[in-house]
Image: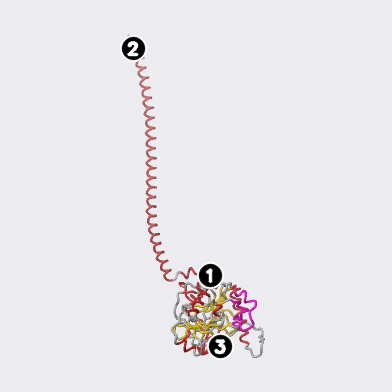
Amino acid sequence: MPKFLCDVRVLLVVAAIAFIYLQLRLFATQSEYAERIAAAVEAENFCTSQMRSLIDQISMQQGRIVALEEQKKLQDLECGQLRTLVQELERKGLQRLIDKVQEPVAAVVIMACNRADYLERTIKSVLKYQSSVALKYPLFVSQDGADPSVRSKALSYDQLAYMQHLDNEPVKTERPGELIAYYKIARHYKWALDELFYKNNFSRVIILEDDMEIAPDFFDYFEAAAALLDNDKSIMAVSSWNDNGQKQFVHDPYTLYRSDFFPGLGWMLSKSIWDELSPKWPKAYWDDWLRLKENHKGRQFIRPEVCRTYNFGEHGSSFGQFFKQYLEPIKLNDVRVDWKSIDLSFLREDKYPRHFADMVKNAKPVYGADVVLKAYNIDGDVRIQYRDQADFERIARQFGIFEEWKDGIPRTAYKGVVVFRYQTPRRIFLVASDSLRWLGID
């Protein structure tokens, strides 16, 4: 019996130990599971946090996308408005803004002295057509002397620059009875052109006088002719004047000619030509000096049939010489010719002789006395030959055109040929005895 009780006790101890072991294992397992659950909960919480953060980022990005879409719509709207604005600016003259970066076609200088009323009339005429192309044609007034009314008048215009030539050096004429004014004018021209070409560095200059009005297409004409002046070295200058431009002798505002006679009275020259002329500029009578063969050296001048300038200066240094007969009846062009659309290549040295020769060749020859009457009774162009200067002057006097010659060249002549209209669109060609040979006409 005691042995049985001992065995039971042993079994109970063993059972107790096993139970305790099982409880410890169970506790360890529960603790492990609790830790895993806690880790899982923590991981879940982290994932939830990350998901919320990602959701927030997605929401933020969606907000940005919406904002960018709105910004794009706004930019598209602004671009449309800008396009409309640009088109409106172009319609109103955007070219004026582009012109700011372009080189001027030419400086325009009005030569003045002591006629404030004449100067005002000239400035108003120039500004009427220059204002829209002011960047292409900077405007200057150059005054010779100190007449206060002229200075005041020039300075009253903001649209132009004022220059003043003060020359106190005494003038000594080369021949008795000569007018000092012609010497002072020559000095003034040299000073003004030196200023514009060398100090202001313009490539071309258009010279006007203070008693001129200009035509509506004055600036377009000179812009079209500038390329000819630059590229054809046989052209010395471009003029807006025709000495025989009186109403009865002109017809076609589109017609241009080359001439061996310097016309002046509104003309353009280039810096390269001035580089040649400036060092030897004459003391007086600069325009007649330019008409000497030794100075123009066979080069020619472009001139229109219908004048682009009108000289209203009855009172001046020349005391109205020829004014009533030759200047007052001048026809000032009133047609706005689109010179940019016209091919002027026919005026080039390699083309013009043939072009002009064809016109002369096709004209009907007229001989004998009463050439004016005979020409009037012919419908087409007429060709009249003259023997010498005296014969030319006789014929010119009958028609009423300029009789004057300089250094063997009649006014407006090309290869000895003077051309003008007479009463109708017919052209009259006064032809020197050698002209046909010079032009290659049999």
Q: Do the residues labelled 3 and 1 touch (CB within 8 Å)?
A: no
Q: What residue type is labelled 3?
A: Asp
State left or right for residue 74 relative to residue 209. left
Residue 391, disc? 3
Q: Is residue 54 above or below residue 441?
A: above
Q: Position of residue 84 (x, y in %)?
A: 39, 65
Which residue is found at the position 39% from the left and 59% from the top?
Answer: 76
Front label number (3 vs 1): 3
Residue 5, disc? 2
Please name the residue that numbered disc 1 is placed on. Answer: 103
Question: Is residue 163 visible from the viewing direction of this image?
Answer: yes
User: SS for tag 1?
Assistant: loop
Q: Is residue 424 above or below residue 85?
A: below
The magenta stretch spans residue 285: yes
Residue 398 or residue 227, whichever sits in front: 398
Q: What range of the chain is rendered magenta?
A: 273-298
